């Protein structure tokens, strides 16, 4: 069991690691991705996943109190993990699970929401607001087009919105398949850590925090910092590969910089404890 001092050291190490990855993406990758997006195959889909990852890393920079911020930090780690799985599938399995399929899922989700909102408002007898009318209009405008997409991408759903993820599979299966394409520990993370992250993100009950001592919260947040950094690096790698701006030396230097930062922060904590 980690001592309070060890948990605090871990949280500071993870926080620093996430910021190293954030600076790397901003300084070494972002401009090249933006430049290649207009001409790259499905460039916007990959740029979008990188931008989402950047946004999470920038949010983590503001979440510097892991004992209190642990719920938001675990949300970031969970989201970035899913992005890493998705870009891996889109790049390496593009014929079966490419960006067009993800786009179709997004449209299908909007249609489902539009129809549910229309049904609810009709049953309630309440006049819709202008914003709600915009939501309702999506179904009347896009229904035929989206239903064709559903039949194309998820024929086993018989025209319904897919019950699982955009791939038509659950996340555990997607993590396993992504590992076959790019072995980055996706399935292990999904099996061992993902449920714990979810307990902090959504759902009823207090599974993640019940009977947990106050000193453990820094550890929970610190671990999630590291995991967000780990999978943000995967997103950066795959996007760079897809858009033709992969630089092996840059990513080697990133790994070295991360390790040097981890050691420096740890030694600073040890020195502070010994002072």
Image (tube, rainbow, N blue to C red):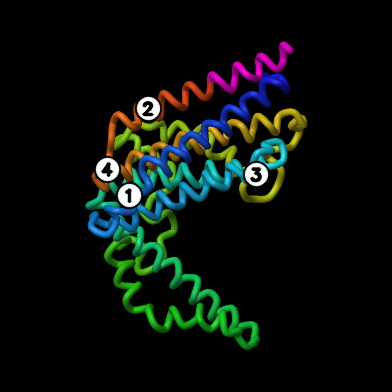
Do residues under tags 1 and 2 come within 8 Å of each other at their CB atoms?
Answer: no
Question: Is any atom of residue 200 visible in this view?
Answer: no
The residues tagged by marks 1 and 4 sit, at their Cα atoms, a distance apart of 7 Å
Farthest residue toward the top? 274
Q: Residues within 10 Å of mark 3 (few under 14, many from 20)?
A: many
Q: Is residue 227 left or right of residue 272?
A: left
Do residues under tags 3 and 4 come within 8 Å of each other at their CB atoms?
Answer: no
Q: Is residue 134 above or below residue 146?
A: below
> Who comes first in sequence, dot 2 or dot 4?
4
Q: Which residue is mark 4?
A: 245
Q: Which residue is mark 2?
A: 253
The question of residue 156 being in magenta is answered with: no
Do residues under tags 1 and 4 come within 8 Å of each other at their CB atoms?
Answer: yes
The residues tagged by marks 3 and 1 sit, at their Cα atoms, a distance apart of 31 Å
Do residues under tags 3 and 1 come within 8 Å of each other at their CB atoms?
Answer: no
Extent of the magenta region = 263-275
Corner quadrant of residue 16 = top right
Q: Secondary structure at mark 4?
A: loop
**Nearer to us: label 3 or label 1:** 1
Q: Is residue 142 left or right of residue 267?
A: left
Q: Which residue is mark 1?
A: 33
Do residues under tags 2 and 4 come within 8 Å of each other at their CB atoms?
Answer: no
> Who comes first in sequence, dot 3 or dot 4?
3
Q: Position of residue 153 (x, y in %)?
A: 30, 61
Q: Is residue 211 left or right of residue 37?
A: right
Q: Is residue 97 above or below residue 265?
A: below
The residues tagged by marks 1 and 2 sit, at their Cα atoms, a distance apart of 19 Å
Q: Which residue is mark 3?
A: 71
């Amino acid at each position: 069991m980690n001592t309070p001092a060890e948990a605090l050291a871990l949280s500071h190490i993870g926080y620093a690691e996430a910021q190293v990855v954030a600076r790397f993406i901003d300084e070494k990758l972002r401009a090249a991705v933006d430049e290649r997006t207009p001409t790259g195959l499905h460039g916007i889909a990959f740029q979008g996943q990188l931008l989402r990852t950047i946004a999470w890393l920038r949010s983590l920079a503001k979440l510097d109190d892991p004992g209190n911020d642990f719920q938001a930090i675990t949300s970031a780690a969970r989201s970035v993990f899913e992005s890493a799985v998705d870009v891996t599938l889109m790049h390496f399995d593009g014929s079966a699970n490419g960006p067009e399929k993800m786009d179709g899922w997004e449209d299908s989700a909007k249609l489902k929401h539009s129809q549910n909102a229309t049904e609810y408002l009709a049953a309630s007898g309440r006049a819709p607001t202008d914003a709600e009318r915009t939501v309702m209009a999506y179904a009347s405008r896009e229904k035929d087009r989206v239903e064709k997409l559903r039949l194309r991408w998820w024929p086993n759903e018989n025209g319904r919105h897919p019950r699982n993820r955009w791939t038509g599979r659950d996340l555990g299966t997607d993590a396993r398949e992504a590992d076959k394409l790019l072995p980055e520990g996706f399935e292990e993370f999904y099996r061992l850590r993902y449920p714990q992250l979810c307990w902090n993100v959504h759902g009823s009950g207090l599974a993640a925090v019940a009977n947990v001592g106050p000193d453990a919260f820094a550890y929970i947040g610190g671990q999630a910092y590291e995991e967000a950094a780990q999978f943000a690096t995967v997103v950066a790698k795959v996007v760079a590969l897809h858009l033709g701006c992969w630089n092996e030396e840059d990513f080697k230097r990133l790994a070295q910089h991360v390790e040097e930062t981890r050691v420096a922060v740890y030694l600073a904590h040890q020195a502070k404890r010994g002072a």
